[in-house]
Image (cartoon, rainbow, N blue to C red):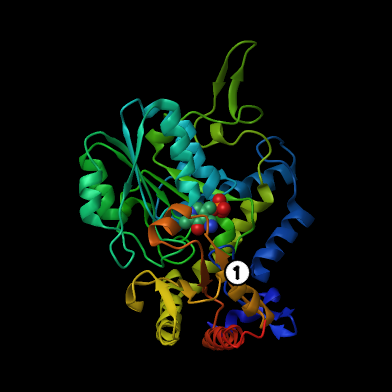
């Protein structure tokens, strides 16, 4: 993978006179030249509004916008580009399912099931929905080492459950959830399976159909693409029964004075001028990841976890959240060091050019569940190297020394 470092101009940045070691990939990823060049080329040569004009540029822009739908559906193992709705990102996608599908399909007394490891964007929309319609929100618990507890899922999901929504991979614990098994369980009880794929699609081969997902959401910026673009994939019949949330230009079939007929999905959800350059950039990111090969990305991240985890585990006073076996971990590592607040640790690492995240990672219920206020988090991606892992470990050891000397 080292040969692709040249594709990422930002990795040459110096931070506090040190080479940047970017380990905040769960928050957002860096962009390769291929994505940046594609967006620039689009603006320099093809820019126009889509679906609206018959002129050449409008046709070119529309063609690209629709071709990316095909790339997306192939990338995630769907079979119909019309099942791909462009959104701002995972958050918007999940909100749309809650407000557009949930508001008409979830009723008083129904149950919505999530887990304790969810990101706020897979909790808050369901809380809002539950409060609005009088439904009950229930949580699947975790095993002692931070994996989804399937036994708990079997108890929590009942005949009253109408919707289960889980992250495919956790942004804190470094675990991949058994979506297929939970989807089967959900379907046995007549519920639908919604999946937050923000931390999965960038890192592993995903097949929404094999998983048994009914809705699947993810963000472009976490997979080498630009910010402001994401995807809601949904089964055709479910998208057909889902209310649009943005009314206006382009999403209509016919507008009368007092009544409007909407287009078919996905167009009825894409009201107004969309993030066309974002879509084009997402297409370039998919091309890039396809060229590298998702299996190679997964293998690379796994080898980095296997390399770094034992070194991290050896540091006295460290607590690592999630399973200790590197074989069942992604490239996300959350941890705390006794006596050092994660924010202080992240600031100290930044002095060495190492970018990690500190805080609750938009997962406050999980933090409470783990009994911590915050954690530090390093998250690896395809452009990280063993040298990055060494610099990261050294920076932690230096920070530990610094704080234990009381020299701050
Ligand atoms: N779910 C998970 C698991 C995430 O990690 C994130 C981003 N941190 C989101 C949802 C939200 O994604 P976005 O901010 O791109 O909408």
Q: Nearer the viewer, residue 350 or 306?
A: 350
Q: Is mark 1 within 8 Å of ligand 1?
A: no
Q: Is residue 46 above or below residue 303?
A: above
Q: Which residue is mark 1?
A: 343
Q: Is residue 172 left or right of residue 282?
A: left
- The total number of labels drawn is 1
Q: Nearer the viewer, residue 58 or 202?
A: 202
Callout 1 environment at 10 Å: few (<14), some (14 to 19), or many (20+)?
Answer: some
Q: Is residue 27 above or below residue 96?
A: below
Which residue lies at the image location 56% right of the left edge and 68% below the top edge? 25
Q: Is residue 343 left or right of residue 193?
A: right
Can residue 262 be seen here? The reply is yes
Q: Is residue 256 above or below residue 218?
A: above
Extreme-right residue of the structure: 44
Q: Nearer the viewer, residue 405 or 82?
A: 405
Question: In the picture, which quadrant includes the C terminus?
Answer: bottom right
Q: Is residue 159 above or below residue 285?
A: above
Extreme-front residue of the structure: 406
Residue 189: % across, % down: 22, 38
Q: Quadrant of residue 205?
A: bottom left
Q: Quadrant of residue 300?
A: bottom left
Q: Is residue 353 left or right of residue 70?
A: right
Residue 127: % across, % down: 44, 38
Residue 271: % across, % down: 62, 33
Q: Quadrant of residue 77?
A: bottom left
Which residue lies at the image location 39% right of the left edge and 34% below the top edge? 238
Can residue 85 be seen here? The reply is no
Residue 18: % across, % down: 70, 85
Which type of secondary structure does the marked residue at label 1 adopt?
Answer: helix
Extreme-top residue of the structure: 258
Q: Nearer the viewer, residue 345 or 17?
A: 345
């Amino acid at each position: 993978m080292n040969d692709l470092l040249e594709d990422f101009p930002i990795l040459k940045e110096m931070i506090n006179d040190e080479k940047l070691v970017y380990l905040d990939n769960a928050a957002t990823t860096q962009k390769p030249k291929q994505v940046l060049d594609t967006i620039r080329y689009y603006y320099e040569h093809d820019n126009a509004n889509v679906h609206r004009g018959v002129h050449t540029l409008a046709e070119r822009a529309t063609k690209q916008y629709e071709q990316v739908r095909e790339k997306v559906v192939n990338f995630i193992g769907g079979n119909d580009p019309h099942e791909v709705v462009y959104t701002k990102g995972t958050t918007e996608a999940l909100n749309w399912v809650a407000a557009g599908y949930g508001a008409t399909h979830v009723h008083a007394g129904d149950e919505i099931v999530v887990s304790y490891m969810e990101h706020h964007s897979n909790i808050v929309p369901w809380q809002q929905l539950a409060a609005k319609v009088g439904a009950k929100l229930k949580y699947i618990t975790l095993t002692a080492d931070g994996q989804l507890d399937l036994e708990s899922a079997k108890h929590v999901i009942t005949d009253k459950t109408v919707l289960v929504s889980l992250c495919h991979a956790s942004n804190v614990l470094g675990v991949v959830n058994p979506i297929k098994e939970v989807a089967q369980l959900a379907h046995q009880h007549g519920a639908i399976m919604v999946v937050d794929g923000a931390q999965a699609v960038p890192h592993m081969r995903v097949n929404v159909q094999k998983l048994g997902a009914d809705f699947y959401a993810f963000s472009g910026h976490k997979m080498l693409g630009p910010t402001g673009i994401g995807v809601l994939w949904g089964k055709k019949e479910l998208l057909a029964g889902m209310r649009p949330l943005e009314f206006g230009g382009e999403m209509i079939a016919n507008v009368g004075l007092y009544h409007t007929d909407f287009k078919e999905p996905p167009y009825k959800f894409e009201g107004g001028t969309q993030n066309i350059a974002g879509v084009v950039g997402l297409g370039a990111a998919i091309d890039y990841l396809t060229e590298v090969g998702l299996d190679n990305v997964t293998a690379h991240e796994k080898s980095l976890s296997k390399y770094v985890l034992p070194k991290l585990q050896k540091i006295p006073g460290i607590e690592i959240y999630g399973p200790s076996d590197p074989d069942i971990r992604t490239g996300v590592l959350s941890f705390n060091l006794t006596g050092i607040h994660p924010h202080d640790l992240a600031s100290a690492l930044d002095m060495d050019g190492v970018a990690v995240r500190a805080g609750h990672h938009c997962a406050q219920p999980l933090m409470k569940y783990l009994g911590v206020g915050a954690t530090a988090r390093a998250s690896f991606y395809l452009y990280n190297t063993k040298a990055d892992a060494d610099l990261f470990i050294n920076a932690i050891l230096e920070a530990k020394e610094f704080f234990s000397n009381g020299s701050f």
